[in-house]
Image: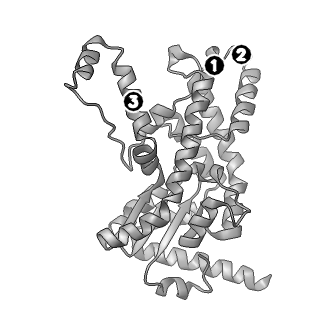
Amino acid sequence: MLFASAAEFRSSPRKAVTVFGMAGVGKTRLGNILRRADWFHFSVDFRIGTRHMGEFIVDNFKREAMKVPFLAELLRSDSISIQSNLSFDNLEPLSTYLGTPGNPAKGGLTFAEYQRRQEQHRVAEIYALLDVPYFIERAKALYGYDDFLCDTGGSLIEVLDPHNPNDPVVKALADNTTLLYLRGTENDAQRLIDRFKSNPKPMYYPPDFLIGKWDEFKSINGVTHDDDVDPDAFAVWGFEALLRDRLPRYQALADNFGYAIDATELSDVRDEKDFMELMCRAIAARSVVAAKS
């Protein structure tokens, strides 16, 4: 959804916005703000971790519990149940399931198992994004919400072609929502890298990129065997490489199908009124650029 003017966006009776950008740039914070103003907050990561990967996550919990004889006996007799407490603000169950490849003694997964779970996530993310049009109408029909915010994961850009209007995910989002890129600076990137070291988030790598970076990391560190890779070290190194690889593709998606604001501007948003002003400025700025070209 592109608008002829900011006034057109402001006057639309129902608003639907998809925010995207680097993991940790402020998308979920914005969702929490707008939820207080009666916007429906659709978290793609939450949808992935509950609807589309929930069974994988819980089965992994059970697999670990079955290694403990006391818990195994209780599970077999249906005396206990195990479930995930994943929430908008706590994606740890999803992060734990996706894991990191490397030394099993340090909590790493075999590279083949990591690839298998990555593919599960790719499929789940596509399905979750294709759920957006349905949830826009569901939010209205069931709960009476006119306004809708789609809070995407950082890996959104890995499951679509930012140059193709007929890409299924691009089409689902651009036809039904206004795309808004929360553009981070170099300082933001470094801050996110530092934060990732202490609080890792779910990560998805494109298959070829993952293989290339895995081999590169082993070469740089003089590691021959996969099981000798430090999973934490690879997670941080891989996150930084992937983050920087995504930046131009985020910008391409905004240039082709939506709008962009600097993440620093988002930090000043305290309520719905602030957000509306920010959206209107982004729409006006694109209109000016279009008029000059």
At a point 30% along the width and 69% down the height, the residue shown is 143
Identify the image quadrant of the N terminus: bottom right
Query: What residue is disc 1 on?
Result: 229
Query: What residue is disc 3 on?
Result: 59
What's the CA distance linking mark 1 and mark 3? Answer: 26 Å
At a point 66% along the width and 17% down the height, the residue shown is 226
Dot 3: element: helix
Dot 2: element: loop
Q: Residues within 10 Å of mark 1 (few under 14, many from 20)?
A: many
Identity, as a three-letter code, of the amino acid under mark 1: Val
Query: What residue is disc 2 on?
Result: 223
- Nearer to us of marks 1 and 3 is 3
Question: Looking at the rendering, which quadrant does residue 55 occupy?
Answer: top left
Dot 1: element: loop
What's the CA distance linking mark 1 and mark 2? Answer: 7 Å
33 or 149, nearer to the observer: 149
What's the CA distance linking mark 3 and mark 2? Answer: 32 Å
What is the image's colouring? one colour
Question: Looking at the rendering, which quadrant does residue 240 occupy?
Answer: top right
Q: Are marks 1 and 2 in contact (CB under 8 Å)?
A: yes
- Nearer to us of marks 3 and 2 is 3
Identify the image quadrant of the C terminus: bottom right
Identity, as a three-letter code, of the amino acid under mark 2: Val
Res 180 visible = no
Which tag, 1 or 3, sits closer to the chain's start? 3
